[in-house]
Image: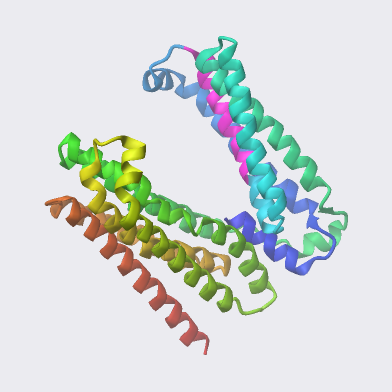
């Protein structure tokens, strides 16, 4: 996210493409991190054997190398997003998925088993990283002097805030399933897991909006152009799509569950619309959070980190049934939305 924002900012001030000095500096940092990861793999190999229940060091090295290549892939993808090359991003991601499937299945078919599956993923990622380098190298600026003038020093405090935000978002949207599995019998926990898989689809409806809006807002902010219209349109569209999804759950929730899980969780069909509705505030909050981070207001990200423990505590003490769990999730999502918009209104008043 921070790389995308920086690239969008640079795009707003330059006309000759992305500064090559910034491009290589980012990849240098990733290479250092990759080297540290591979070095840690050597020392943690015995623990990795125990954790993965395998004696194959080859498998662990393949996984480590795959993670390393994924780091480079993510950086290239973030730079494409910052440059607002959405067509290239679409091809980039779809080709990556297709290559993973084709290569992994082919190597498994030839008898390589798990090693083949991981090797196929690794080979596909290597190919995509090389393609990413080739695409982006054609968009680098040749003017180094002006590029150096616009490159600010690396500031890690926004990274820490955004990173903690990501951890908290995971807690708010994923740990409820873990806690339900802990507190409830297996059949009830299974019903909750089934509806959460479908209900969390509401959160991903705004994913395309966030992907496109984030670099646009960052570029507008660099140009001192107001982006409130983009935010309002994004919230309105997220609300419409989310409520449409919930309406589908009301009408066709039971057939959907039956199609995916058989008749085992048919009793949970009444809970599916409630769960989807509880996800609507979180979908809006995630959209607003990305909007604020694109404008450099990373303080909003701390709201996730601060309030996530309160939700977990509430789930711990008030989990009488699945409806109460869903109510807690919806209530905290609504509280986050309220505090987020309150923060935004206070910021506007301070500027005035």
Task: Judge by depth and name the residue closer to the eye, 191 or 28.
Answer: 191
Residue 143 sits in which quadrant?
bottom right
Residue 209 drawn at (x, y percent): 55, 61
* Magenta-colored span: 56-74
Residue 73 belongs to the span the image colors magenta: yes
- Considering only vertical position in the picture, is 176 above or below 70? below
Q: Residue lying at the far bottom in this picture: please name it.
A: 352
Residue 263 drawn at (x, y percent): 25, 36
Dominant SS of magenta comes to helix
Residue 294 drawn at (x, y percent): 57, 65
Q: Say which quadrant the N terminus sits in.
A: bottom right
Relative to 152, 254 lies left or right: left
Q: Is residue 175 visible?
A: no
Task: Judge by depth and name the residue closer to the eye, 182 or 141.
Answer: 182
Q: Is residue 100 visible?
A: yes
Relative to 173, 263 lies left or right: left
Residue 197 belongs to the span the image colors magenta: no
Residue at horizontal 55 percent and vertical 60 percent from the top: 210
Relative to 15, 165 lies left or right: left
Residue 115 sits in which quadrant?
top right
Residue 189 drawn at (x, y percent): 22, 40
């Amino acid at each position: 996210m921070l790389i995308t924002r920086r690239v969008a900012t640079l795009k707003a001030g330059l006309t000759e493409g992305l500064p090559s000095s910034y491009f290589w500096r980012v990849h240098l940092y990733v290479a250092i991190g990759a080297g540290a990861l591979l070095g840690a793999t050597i020392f943690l190999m015995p623990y990795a054997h125990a954790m993965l229940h395998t004696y194959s060091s080859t498998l662990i090295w393949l996984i480590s190398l795959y993670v390393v290549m994924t780091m480079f892939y993510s950086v290239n993808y973030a730079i494409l997003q910052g440059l607002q090359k959405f067509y290239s991003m679409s091809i980039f991601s779809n080709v990556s998925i297709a290559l993973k499937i084709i290569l992994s299945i082919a190597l498994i078919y030839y008898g390589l088993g798990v090693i083949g599956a991981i090797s196929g993923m690794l080979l596909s990622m290597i190919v995509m990283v090389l393609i990413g380098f080739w695409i982006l190298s054609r968009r680098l600026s040749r003017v180094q002097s002006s590029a150096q003038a616009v490159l600010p020093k690396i500031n890690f405090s926004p990274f820490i805030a955004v990173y903690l935000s990501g951890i908290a978002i995971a807690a708010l949207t994923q740990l409820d399933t873990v806690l339900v599995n802990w507190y409830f019998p297996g059949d009830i926990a299974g019903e909750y897991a089934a509806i959460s898989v479908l209900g969390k689809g509401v959160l991903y409806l705004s994913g395309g909006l966030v992907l496109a809006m984030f670099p646009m807002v960052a570029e507008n902010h660099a140009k001192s152009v107001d982006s409130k219209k983009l935010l309002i349109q994004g919230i309105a569209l997220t609300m419409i799509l989310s409520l449409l999804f919930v309406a589908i759950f009301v009408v066709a929730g039971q057939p959907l569950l039956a199609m995916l899980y058989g008749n085992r969780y048919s009793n949970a069909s009444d809970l599916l619309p409630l769960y989807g509705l509880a996800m609507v505030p979180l979908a809006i909050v995630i959209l607003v959070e990305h909007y604020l981070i694109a404008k450099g207001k990373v303080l909003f990200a701390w709201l996730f980190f601060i309030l996530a423990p309160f939700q977990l505590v509430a789930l711990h003490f008030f989990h009488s049934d699945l409806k109460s769990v869903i109510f807690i999730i919806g209530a905290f999502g609504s509280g986050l939305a309220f505090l987020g918009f309150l923060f935004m209104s206070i910021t506007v008043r301070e500027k005035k």
